[in-house]
Amino acid sequence: MNLDDIRSDIDRIDRQLLQLLSDRADLVHEVGVVKKRDGLQIYAPEREQALLRKLVAMNTGRLPEKSILAIYREIMSAALALEDDLKIAYLGPEGTWTHQAAIKKFGHSVAYSAQPNFSEVFDQVSRRKADYGVVPIENSTEGAVSHTLDLFVDSQLQICAQILMRIENGLMASIPREQIRTLYSHPQVFGQCRNWILRHFPEADLVEVSSTTRAAEIAREKASEGAAALGGPLAAELNGLTLLEECIQDRATNTTRFLVIGEKTCPPTGNDRTSLLFAIHDRPGSLVRALQAFEHFDINMSKIESRPSKRKDWEYIFYVDLAGHCEDPQLRESLEALEKHCSLVKILGSYPDTGE
């Protein structure tokens, strides 16, 4: 075949694809009508994960798995926008890692609403000004994001999905490297790049700001004063900065886990994680006995964090991640046993234990 013949075949296939996408969109619209009529959630993480797994299993062609997932992420994003005018609140401004995590989960077709802090993300969803929120919960290098944990104590929102995102920070500036005197970034990023900073900029002033995007803005505004920023490539691109060095984080596998919060949690999928918080009675051995509730019913606990309750001095609330769904019989029994040793037990949500 010559080049013209090949291009003609591609054009023919493109026409077929557009017609099939249009047919799919018609069906998606009908799905949205039924969901609204029956009071169902528009976004269904359990359906999303089942569909992605099925598509990967069905794929026998040349496209690799990551390409299939990327293509269908945008197809599903367009579907969500057709079913409803979905709005996602996230910790802004535009270009932050949280913004990128939200796009990874919901695609480019839905509406996004940047919020100045964690509390506003929760508030936007609680007041139904946004359908879902995306917030960071922990980093594989720096640990838990305490502000997010604290907000769950008084919030009625539920976790309905998680997002795992590889974080690759870089050095960005509009000046030559040798002119850099001050580094701006989010505190978590400074922690993730601590050893690199000590090796390459041991005498630089480190200034903490609210986000990597804000750091990039300052690097642009104060370039004449020797300002540079640490953050992701999108922040550099949005502010016209040059990435002087990429992947400067101390750990190559540096990953942040984000949560999707909404009004309802997710039905069982067969591969789930449950997050909860509890406060124990102030008695000797209470914490040990509380944790034994999970051991007795053979429930794997993958994470535990403690935070001051902020209601009484030296009183703590414990945050736990468990394998399984809160509707699983074994997990339900373990939670009943846990309540005997606690003054408070609150399930934050059960959701697919996957990073997609």
Image: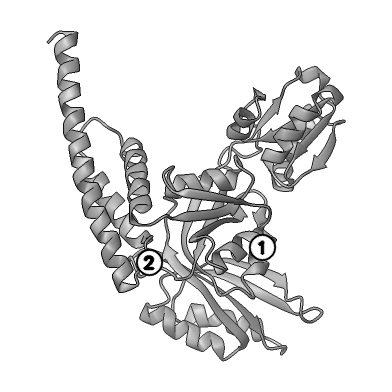
Front residue of 37/252: it is 37
Vertical comparison of 151 with 20: above or below: below
Does residue 196 appear in the picture of this structure? no
Vertical comparison of 80 with 287: above or below: above
Compared across the picture, whether 91 is left or right of 48 comes to right
Front residue of 339/159: it is 159
- Amino acid type for the residue under numbered disc 1: Ser
Q: Position of residue 110 (x, y in %)?
A: 44, 48
Q: Say which residue label 2 marks.
A: 41
Q: Nearer the N terminus, badge 1 or badge 2?
A: 2
Q: How many angstroms separate mark 1 from mark 2 (CA)?
A: 23 Å
Residue drawn at point x = 48 percent, y = 55 percent? 87
Furthest-top residue in this view:
2
- Amino acid type for the residue under numbered disc 2: Gln
Image disc number at residue 101: none
Number of dots carrying numbers: 2
**In the picture, which quadrant includes the N terminus?**
top left
- Looking at the image, do the residues carrying marks 1 and 2 touch, with CB atoms under 8 Å apart? no
Packing grade of label 1 (10 A; few <14, some 14-19, many >=20) is some
Q: Say which residue label 1 marks.
A: 119
Residue drawn at point x = 61 percent, y = 79 percent? 278
Q: Position of residue 289 (x, y in %)?
A: 60, 85
Colour setup of the view: one colour
Query: Dot 1: what SS?
Result: helix
Q: Position of residue 203 (x, y in %)?
A: 87, 30
Query: Dot 2: what SS?
Result: loop
The quarter of the picture where residue 306 lies is bottom right
Vertical comparison of 215 with 275: above or below: above
Q: Position of residue 77 (x, y in %)?
A: 37, 47
The quarter of the picture where residue 351 lies is bottom left
Packing grade of label 2 (10 A; few <14, some 14-19, many >=20) is some
Residue drawn at point x = 60 percent, y = 64 percent? 122
